[in-house]
Amino acid sequence: MDRSPYDTHLDRNLANFTPLSPLSFFTRAKTVYPHRPAYAYGSIRRTWGEVYERASRLASALAAQGIGKNDTVAIIAPNIPAIFDAHFGVPMLGAVLNPINIRLDAATIKYILNHGNAKVLITDTRFAPEVKKALADLGRDDLLVIDIDDTETDEASGERLGEMEFEEFLSAGSADFDWSLPGDEWDAISLNYTSGTTSDPKGVVVHHRGAYLIAMGTIASWPFSAPDPNGFPVHMYVVPLFHCNGWGHAWALAANGGMSVLVRNITAKNLFAAIEEHKVTHFGGAPIVLSMLINASAEERRPFDWPINVYTAAAPPPPSVLHAIEAMGFRLTHVYGLTETYGHVVECAWQEDWNDLDADAVAAKKSRQGVGFSVTEDIQVMDPETMEPVPADGETIGEIMIRGNVVMKGYLNAPEATDAAFAGGYFHSGDLAVRHADGYVQIKDRSKDIIISGGENISSVEIEGVLYKHPDVLAAAVVAKPDEKWGETPCAFLEVRPGSSISEDDVLAFCRNHLAGFKMPKTVVFQELPKTSTGKIQKFVLREQFKA
Amino acid sequence: MDRSPYDTHLDRNLANFTPLSPLSFFTRAKTVYPHRPAYAYGSIRRTWGEVYERASRLASALAAQGIGKNDTVAIIAPNIPAIFDAHFGVPMLGAVLNPINIRLDAATIKYILNHGNAKVLITDTRFAPEVKKALADLGRDDLLVIDIDDTETDEASGERLGEMEFEEFLSAGSADFDWSLPGDEWDAISLNYTSGTTSDPKGVVVHHRGAYLIAMGTIASWPFSAPDPNGFPVHMYVVPLFHCNGWGHAWALAANGGMSVLVRNITAKNLFAAIEEHKVTHFGGAPIVLSMLINASAEERRPFDWPINVYTAAAPPPPSVLHAIEAMGFRLTHVYGLTETYGHVVECAWQEDWNDLDADAVAAKKSRQGVGFSVTEDIQVMDPETMEPVPADGETIGEIMIRGNVVMKGYLNAPEATDAAFAGGYFHSGDLAVRHADGYVQIKDRSKDIIISGGENISSVEIEGVLYKHPDVLAAAVVAKPDEKWGETPCAFLEVRPGSSISEDDVLAFCRNHLAGFKMPKTVVFQELPKTSTGKIQKFVLREQFKA
């Protein structure tokens, strides 16, 4: 068969094809907005021109150490300049950035450095105790360790573990390093380990193409073009950059020359101060961060009179949180995603016919995870055995399945896990959900969080939703408690408002009005709930209490 | 050499790779926003769900006629539903949409149908006289001709040339056609012929990847997320869909479920009526459209109190136009692009340090074409011989060169023209420009519009800029007039305000205050200027006056 004229002498060339990479946004930011602030941190202010220079210095200094394409560069840091710089400098080299959660223990850090075969570790000295143990256990002489000594925090510096400090290392590099885009947009840009609550952490490999597209998807959903009052987005970096690359927002902001406010310690006081000083227009955070803002004292609070757009994820925003936060002037969008999907790929997009609903009905709509972003090719709720979509009846539970360019390459050095995750041509999220008649998806539980009691499946999220309606409940987690008779029964762990005198009987009476009998918690425990650095409640820690 | 672990068992699969195509946005629009209006035209209102059904019917009816991948489907229509539907229905089939300018003569229409090897022609009966001649000359029995009989216009229907009317043809198709995305994002999606003022028209082939990305670039630049007052973009389609696929806006709007107001006849009355009825938030148009709005009568004007975002292209907005249009509440962004770049790839992005400038200084800034969009990989001003960038001195003239994913595949069946256009790894725009110290590009002339007088290069755009400053001048075009002594001399053609008594001497005296002697127009002609359907002044028509 002859080739079509549409395919003849019409090939890719340097003029009409460029691999998709967020590094192109970075080049644009330093070209178009060289004098606009890229980030503020403490007393530090750096423009896109300056951050470009720093990234260039980092890349060239790493290159001088023999680091190059597909080498892993790990970093342990909260949201401070070094990790922002590294999100550009490391990929400039074709190397792969591996941000590691600052709250991990030595054994897990060692596991990650070993499994990811890190060639470099850039580490904040404040985390030296665990990192030092991890390095001792790892016993790798060839690992280049660079310390970050953050000068903007009150916390005392920790022990230095390497030979050079980050700023010294940068000064050895060239501000005008000759770098190039990846040869293939499918090349890896970052390696992010999942939390691994049930097994060893898995290394999620993401690529330049997906990083470019997640940034574009964010811009299409958030009003990221030229928002008031600054004329450009000012994004408060609450989500850790070590978590799904901070949802890719550093890359998205580069596309339009937006600014980030880096916040090391997430407190109500620090967040309100940042909002006031920098006229923040956007941030993302778990409902726990929203609660923090709602419960701030009068001295901590600062007024603002422009719209602030908030993505919230990790858990559905309880109605009370939603009402309170929106009354303060924040515009909340509930989003959903996983490390395997570069962060948010599902959003609770607003529909015009919700304009006339009352506040509770709006809260119910907004508590749903929603629909795909513009860059999410397909989101389905399926029976994982048959791969048939469940009916859109709001009741039948299936597993959320995701397809598209913002799904990871796969898990590093784990072909079986990768194959299982992609079985049937969709990424299996592990989250159990229903699909409503309007197509919106609502999570009912993580696969492993479903409670099976007397043969009935009970959604822990449904019980938590009821508990959150109680005015005294600040945070709730329901987990399966082993039971001789029923197999498992629901146990409710509650954080209550200071001064509340609520009792177990009160809680059970409240639940009885809202839940079928077999779904009732059998036990209620009042305690502070264990949480991850991103505010996710760690149910596995609660489950371990039963073992102990 | 061993493969890196980052490239091992981490290949593309159905879950993590989808060819980029604006059809994915279309699927999202009908899934997420099935009840939101996709377009309004006259008394017609259709939702994204309905337009999806129509596109599906069109694709399946064409498939039943044997049309498929890489077949050319031509369409001759103004901005009416059929051409909007076709921008989705034709690509669903893998076929290539070839929109043809409604104002072309029979000979050019015939040239295009023949050169593009059209299998189908969908044609508005109002253009039957020229189309009939073209078809008779073409003499192709196998061409399927489908007539559009627009029921929403006052103009009398024209002669039917085919066997079926468009709505009948749609009703033969299936509302739920089983289609698929292109096998390769590099597959052609559309064929657009350049105006060919100096030679035969050239067929610009564009692909799905570029169409996806130009849409994303638009969204990143315009506030296309969820603008007031509707909560979604409402775009008035002034730019013809037969011109660079209407700058790709139909595709961009699908990504967020935006709405289009289709306007067949561009008059001030129609535009203001559309703005009032639909609360338009966006439109694009040449400065001539802006002048039309500025000069509208009191009866034609309608008030509005929300921001309307306007892209203007084709010619720099004269300061008087800029001041007047912004005073009315329109927010103007000057953009630049070519058919070869899917439309706009350069924008005059706002800089904070312009906030303090006076109105004239702002106008001077905004008259420049600007910097690349987020999806434009690189824009340079280069010496086309050496391919060296000119100094950023605001004076040295070079040619605008463009690189990136929003550059065409090439010209259809024209390998030499394609090679010439891409020589040196950049697309050669043919536009002559300078680069300012801040990196912003400003066009001085089309290569062929430079006037060479006594060996000196004279920019016709520079003279026009001076003429536009005169309060009586509505439109100005300066072209080279053949001259025995000087080779060429500048001749100014002027459209002046009704009732103006300005004379040739007045014009020359005005110019003398602003121009070097050798740049002075030698002749001034007062007349209505010939314009294309997009409002571009046709200088070649003026030049022909000298030949006659």
Image: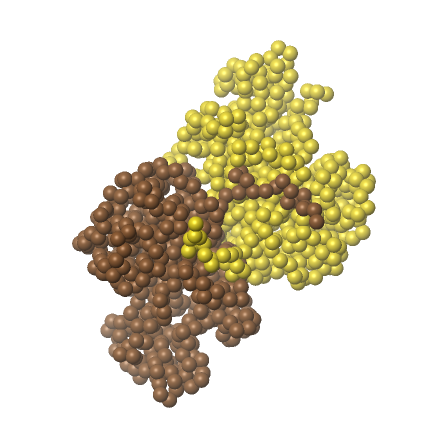
Chain colours: A brown, B yellow
Residue A53 falls left or right of residue A370 = left
Residue B483, by quadrant, is: top right
Q: Residue at x 66, y 56 (%)?
A: B55
Nearest the eye: A262 or B67: B67
Residue A539, by quadrant, is: bottom left
Vertical order, A49 against A454 (above or below): above
Q: Residue extending furthest top?
A: B485
Q: Residue extending furthest front?
A: B1
Residue B137, by quadrant, is: top right
**Residue B379 in picture, x, y percent from top left:** 49, 36
**Residue A92 in picture, x, y percent from top left:** 39, 44
Q: Residue at x 39, y 53 (%)?
A: A190
Asked if residue B330 can be seen in this view, the reply is: no
Vertical order, A28 against B478 (above or below): below
Question: Which quadrant does the C terminus of chain B fall into?
Answer: top right
Nearest the eye: A450 or A355: A450
Residue B304 falls left or right of residue A288 = right
Nearest the eye: A32 or B511: A32
Q: Residue at x 64, y 11 (%)?
A: B484
Q: Residue at x 39, y 87 (%)?
A: A486
**Residue A53 in picture, x, y percent from top left:** 33, 39
Asked if residue A548 can be seen in this view, the reply is: yes
**Residue B292 in picture, x, y percent from top left:** 59, 37
